[in-house]
Image (cartoon, helix red, strand yellow):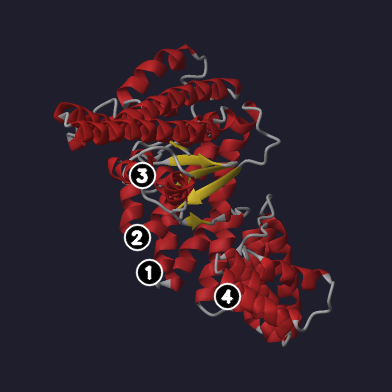
Amino acid sequence: MADFDTNETMMTVRQLISRQSITAIARGALVMLTAGTLGIAQTAVANAQSSSVPIVRDAEIEALVTDYATPIINAAGLGKHAIKIVLVNNPSFNAFVDGRRIFINTGALLQAETPNEIIGVLAHETGHLAGGHQFQLREQIANAKTMAVVASLIGMGAVVGGAAAGAKGLSQAGMGVAMGAPEVAMRSLLNYQRTEEMAADRSAVTYLASTGQSVKGMLTTFERFSNALSLTGTRMDPYRISHPMPRERIANLETLARASRYFDKTDSPALQQRHDLMRGKIAAYTGSGASVMQTFRKDPKNIGARYGDAIATYLNGSSQSALSKIDALIKEQPKNPYFQEIRGEILLKQNKAQDAANAFQKASALDPRKSGLIRMSYGRALMLTGTPANLKMSIDEIKASIGRDRESPAGYGYLAQAYGQMGDMVRSDLASAEEKYYSGKIQEAQIFATRAQRGLKSGTPEWIQAQDIISAKRK
């Protein structure tokens, strides 16, 4: 995994080749690397990669960040690889890649004042994907572990041999080798990672130039990191971090950046406005009205500030005031689908399900991407009206939303409710099984799937769907 920040990778490296874990391995096998030893090391890798990531879903933000990333991904030759952008609910300025996904923190989206700053981050992460860095890094981690283990075994062997021969100096030297092995392995791995980061920076410059965009946003980001380090007063050993120091990155990029004819190019007003709206929404949902005001303290009348204020007002429980504020924005931008989406959420809070359904229907009609998330909200509002005609439409809409986003637990949850209201408990159980499955609750999913399967005809697609869940992770 390659990330834009310095902290998380360092923690992973320490977990993988910590002095304590290597010593424990060495004690278990002084003579040779056994299968058990390799198993212990591999478990460390699994543990480091298994931490959960809090994912955020939002049609508006996903559409914007995808628009930022698509030209860059195409420039890198990855347009046919179905690269997915994933939003992470984390306040830090960070991004990373894994598989064919680019993860970006909401903190980065909130702190970046211009689209170009985020586009620079995405260009850097795309450089990691195009360079295959995550796969090469895994090989380097394996090499580092092997180097550390072998050196530790040699050192521990010298300890045993020295003790047997009564050579105190040899025993002490052997212990020094054993204790120093993880440090050598870690420094080697970190040096490799710093090389990868510089390669990703250079690739990002190439992608930005080929898409006619400035590198200035990347320099702004590195200035932010440098200032943060200066404010903390932290002194860092440049050989013990996974990324080059921010000042070093700026020095390496500035000449290339200023040589580009696009260096002084700015984002279009329309794109900047979408960026401001995104920041207002994130500030409201992750903070409060005060957070929105702080974000737009330089421009309190910005449309992003007013949008964030409307959302914060709604979240604070003042739904009627929020409705007035969002209606004013709709009057200003009648074709904005996301204003209608928020309007629908406010109306649901007022228990006006039919009015909410109408708002979501307008949002879906205006949405050029036909987001599954908006259609899911439309289906949910129809379901909450409770009328038989709307229930049937609700199921159709929710199923359509799932068709566009098959791994959405919420969609299956609403589908289970709709089928339950119609009295179709078999399909309600099957939808509940899917909801539990995609929430990672496999045992509960299998209980619902087993119950649903009893009411389904053997061999039908729905029966097979239930069987797939029943059989999941049995090994």
- At label 4, counting other C-alpha atoms closer than 10 Å, the crowd grade (few under 14, some 14-19, many 20 or more) is some
Which residue is painted at 50% across and 36% down in the image? 138
Instruction: Identify the mark at residue 110; answer none if there is no mark.
Output: none
Per the image, label 4 sits on a secondary structure element best described as helix
Q: Mark 4 points at which residue?
A: 444
The disc, 1 or 2, on the residue closer to the chain's N-terminal end is 2
Q: Mark 1 points at which residue?
A: 316
The disc, 4 or 1, on the residue closer to the chain's N-terminal end is 1
Which residue is painted at 66% across and 54% down in the image? 367
Instruction: Identify the mark at residue 25; answer none if there is no mark.
Output: 3
Q: Distance between the residues labelled 1 and 3?
A: 54 Å
Q: Name the residue under label 2.
A: 288
Q: Would residue 107 appear left or right of 179 to someone viewing this image?
A: right
Per the image, label 1 sits on a secondary structure element best described as loop
Q: Which mark lies nearer to you, 1 or 3?
A: 3
For this rendering, which residue is in front, 303 or 459? Answer: 459
> Considering only vertical position in the picture, is 157 above or below 297?
above
